[in-house]
Image (cartoon, helix red, strand yellow):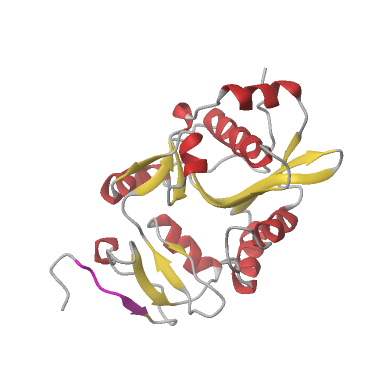
Amino acid sequence: MMGPNDGYLTLLDERHIEFPPTNCALRDPNGLLAIGGKLSPPWLLTAYRRGIFPWFSDDQPILWWSPSPRCVVFPERCRIGRSLRKVLRRGTFQVTFDRAFEQVVEACRAPRPDAEGTWITDEMRDAYVEMHRLGHAHSVEVWRENRLAGGLYGIALGRVFFGESMFHRETDASKVAFVHLVRQLELWGCPLIDCQVSNPHLTSLGAVEVPREDFERLLEAAVRQPPFPQPWKLSWSYE
């Protein structure tokens, strides 16, 4: 039997875009809120504005999450370590925005040595490619000699960026992508980057955890702000 604060899982009606209050999310697994619905742009935009995101495997239905604590980056607090500063100073990599969105997603989908399968299903890939076509999803590409060495992608709403996934084929390439993203968003007045769930890689770059209530309060104000400039153009460089 569930206790009063254990939450409950909601089955969504595909005919109506309506999510339950996020404080209803399960504690175990942390943040699982609802099942079902669709991955269409209206569903995704509604979810992200509430701080809810989809995450599921090929053999699962669509699962929606709102974990607590939430992993976030405040751009002005992003840390650039000594070794990464050396990489940036050398100028080994070239960085672009939105030049190869589908390539970045496919690279993020690729099998990794430390994981089984991928959560970026065909359905998820198609959904985010459509979001990119509509101007809601963006990618950062890191190149070395015209070859894609790393990158990341995510969703932008108002003045918030919701990071989805990153990859690297060369050491430090994903960190270079992340730093360029964070610094450019800082120039554009972004107060908050959502990283969803913490891991050591993000923590090393300055990510912190905040309670769900604090995250949602910051999110509500930031998504109401004017959107980032379109098209995305990189104007930050390390000096």
- Asked if the magenta segment contains residue 224, the reply would be no
- Residue 80: % across, % down: 55, 26
Residue 109 visible somewhere in the drawing:
yes
- Depth order, front residue of 128/226: 128
- Residue 84: % across, % down: 62, 27
Residue 24 vs 152, above or below: the answer is: below
Q: Residue at x 58, y 21 (%)?
A: 82
Residue 208 vs 28, above or below: the answer is: above
Residue 236 occupies which quadrant of the picture? top right
What secondary structure characterizes most of the magenta part?
A: loop
Q: Which residues are magenta?
A: 6-11
Q: Is residue 168 left or right of residue 38?
A: right
Q: Residue at x 35, y 67 (%)?
A: 32
Residue 33 vs 212, above or below: the answer is: below
- Residue 202: % across, % down: 49, 41
Q: Residue at x 30, y 66 (%)?
A: 28
Farthest top residue in view: 239
Residue 217 occupies which quadrant of the picture? top left
- Residue 69: % across, % down: 32, 50
Q: Residue at x 66, y 37 (%)?
A: 172
Residue 207 vs 198, above or below: the answer is: above
Residue 225 occupies which quadrant of the picture? top left
